[in-house]
Amino acid sequence: RRYGNTEREAVRQLSLSMKADETYPTGTFYFSDTDDIRNKTRQPNYRYAIAALERLGHNVEVIDTPLPVGQRDVIGLTTGAATFSWIASGSKFVPGAIGDNLTSFGGRLTDSGQTKLSEFLRNNAAGASGTVVEPYALQAKFPHPLIHAHYARGCTLAESYYQSLQSPFQQLIVGDALCQPFATRPTIKVDGVKPGEKVSGQMKLMIDVTESPTPISKLELYVDGVRVVNSRMRKEIKFDTTGIPDGFHELRFVVVA
């Protein structure tokens, strides 16, 4: 019996989550409230996550079952159950969703006994995690419910996990680490150089971010992958080409929101 995901499942799951970037999906964040100790561990912190998500304008629902039943709009789930079947729940993950379950061996993909994190990924969640060694029911060893608020503010899946994990040493985090369904990407325009242009001497590069949909805090310039400018946002950069040999080179401009 297999406990992980097949290559085909993994490619499909990653393809779906990549398409979710910057889509601001409509959905509901679900928090399971049962008597299982796996749920009780995180229940005291539900209120912080719920308040943060509601301030951001998102739908939140607290359920009295391990999984939402017959819900087709799951963008986030925090639950705690030793075993479950996502298909049997009749629910559906929205592309970009996080499914998070607190149980002892959700990340141990070598043996049976508990449902694995792969169950969420197999059913199109963008990311999930599970422990590989007995962690006991300690909040610090599992994602804080605020993981969903970090995600809803525009952080990547990986950023959201690591902001919510105080003690990550037993956790296996799997999925599309860069998935950002709630991000607004900054934009930049550069004048003073064109693709394929032959240049020499000192270049005067003009930076325009006036049409960026999100404020810019920092500008970076990379030449052949090496960062040569790292500063607060400015409108002009002077770059001396005499310091690099003749030939083809790549200039990459990066703005940080």
Image (cartoon, rainbow, N blue to C red):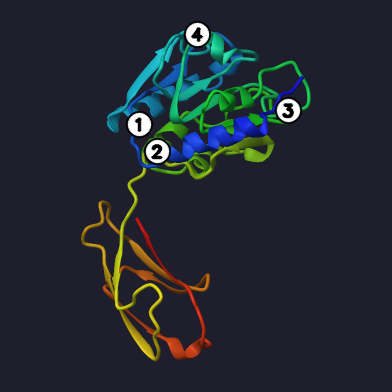
Counting residues from the start of the chain, the first of labels 1 and 4 encountered is 1
* Amino acid type, callout 2: Pro
Q: Earlier in the sequence, mark 4 or mark 2?
A: 4
Q: Position of residue 69 (x, y in %)?
A: 46, 9
| Amino acid at pointer 1 | Pro
> In the image, what residue occupies the spot 53% across and 88% down?
245
Q: Is residue 87 left or right of residue 148?
A: right
Name the residue beneath numbered marker 4: 65
232 is higher (above) or lower (below) than 130 = below
Q: Amino acid at mark 3?
A: Leu
Q: CA distance from mark 1 to mark 3?
A: 30 Å
- Assign a secondary structure to mark 2: loop
For label 1, the residue is 25
Residue 195 location in percent, x, y?
A: 38, 72
The answer to whether the residue labelled 4 contacts the one labelled 2, judged by CB atoms less than 8 Å apart, is no
Residue at 27% over, 29% down: 57
Residue at mark 4 to residue at mark 2: CA–CA distance: 27 Å
2 or 1: tag closer to the N-terminus: 1
Q: Residues within 10 Å of mark 1 (few under 14, many from 20)?
A: some
Residue 181 is tagged as 2
Badge 3 is on which residue?
A: 109
* Left or right: 221 in relation to 184: right
241 is higher (above) or lower (below) than 224: below
Q: Are marks 1 and 3 in contact (CB under 8 Å)?
A: no
Residue 142 lies, in percent from the top left, at 59, 30
In the figure, residue 83 lies in which quadrant?
top right
- The answer to which of 194 and 256 lies nearer the viewer is 194
**What's the mark number on residue 151?**
none
Q: Are marks 2 and 1 in contact (CB under 8 Å)?
A: yes
How far is the residue under mark 4 from the one under mark 3?
A: 25 Å
Query: Does 211 appear above or below 117?
Result: below
